[in-house]
Image (cartoon, rainbow, N blue to C red):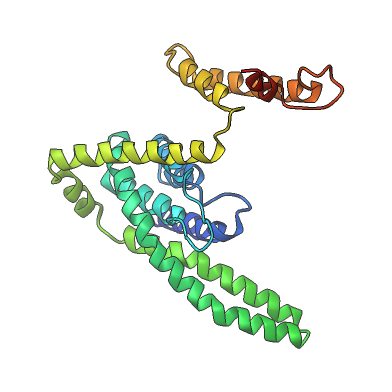
Amino acid sequence: MNMIQVILVVIVAFFAGMEGILDQFQFHQPLVACTLIGLVTGNLEAGIILGGSLQMIALGWANIGAAVAPDVALASVASSIILVLGGQGKEGVSTAIAIAVPLAVAGLFLTMVVRTLAVPVIHMMDKAADEGNFRKVELLQIAALVMQGLRIAIPALLLLFISPEIVRGLLESMPQWVADGMAIGGGMVVAVGYAMVINMMASREVWPFFALGFVVAAISDLTLMGLGAIGVSLAVIYLNLSKMGGSNGGNQVGDPLDDILNDY
């Protein structure tokens, strides 16, 4: 990996760290971060596959109350770098996914450190606001965001200094039973993440769509574009039926699927 690629990877990691707080352009999401790192390193296809697989896991990660979700930005960036340094291409995606999960959990420590350091910054911002120095407030806010970016950029830079031969050697020396176990575990984590999302969204109204999508997805002749078109069509049909109302003659707007299910 040449110096330009290293700089571009660090820039992507920096923006991914900031986006973990901002949530404006979603650079921290695996599908975006892994794809960008794959693009700048010349491993676009492997980056997309890794990002799509990690995205299914990250769907179930969310900050709820005082519980902080695993660090998806660090998981995306670090696993992408390991995939690139390992030189295994698409064949190394399953191993990178399995490595990403413990990295995401370990990233919680860095998140705690940065948020602890941000506490005095907030107090400084409060003091500056009392003084009417809004320029200082803006600068302190930018400084806090820079800390979030460095939270991912620094580990990424340290990983990039590891010799690719060392990473490749470690991956190749891994016993086959360990590699197979990590691949199976990574697949199970994807299923658990998707199940968590379904559990949050599950209702009587959406279960028929889930069952229909599950059956349609098993048809091997359908492409992802075809499945997407079917999903959009079903969403449009559902929205139009909702606007028309249920079985009450259109006098009151209701949920047609709810009316149908209530009849049973």
Q: Please name the residue shown 45% across and 66% down the image.
A: 111
Looking at the image, residue 83 sits to the left or right of residue 153; the answer is: left
Q: Where does the image place residue 196, in percent across and percent down from the top left?
A: 46, 41
Residue 51 in view of the camera = no
Q: Where does the image place residue 110, in percent across and percent down from the top left?
A: 41, 67
Q: Where does the image place residue 43, in percent across and percent down from the top left?
A: 39, 40
In the image, farthest residue toward the front: 264
**Where 97 sits versus 243, above or below?**
below
Q: Where does the image place residue 48, in percent across and percent down from the top left?
A: 44, 37
Looking at the image, residue 5 sits to the left or right of residue 243; the answer is: left
> Depth check: 261 or 130 in front?
261
Q: Please name the residue shown 51% across and 47% down the image.
A: 29
Looking at the image, residue 239 sits to the left or right of residue 101; the answer is: right
> Depth check: 31 or 240 in front?
240
Residue 182 in view of the camera = yes
Q: Quadrant of the C terminus?
A: top right
Q: Please name the residue shown 48% across and 72% down the image.
A: 114
**Where 239 sits versus 103, above or below?**
above
Image mark count: 0
> Depth check: 57 or 17 in front?
57
In the image, farthest residue toward the right: 251
Specify the quadrant of the image occupied by residue 156: bottom left
**Where 136 sits versus 225, above or below?**
below
Specify the quadrant of the image occupied by residue 244: top right
> Depth check: 155 or 227 in front?
227
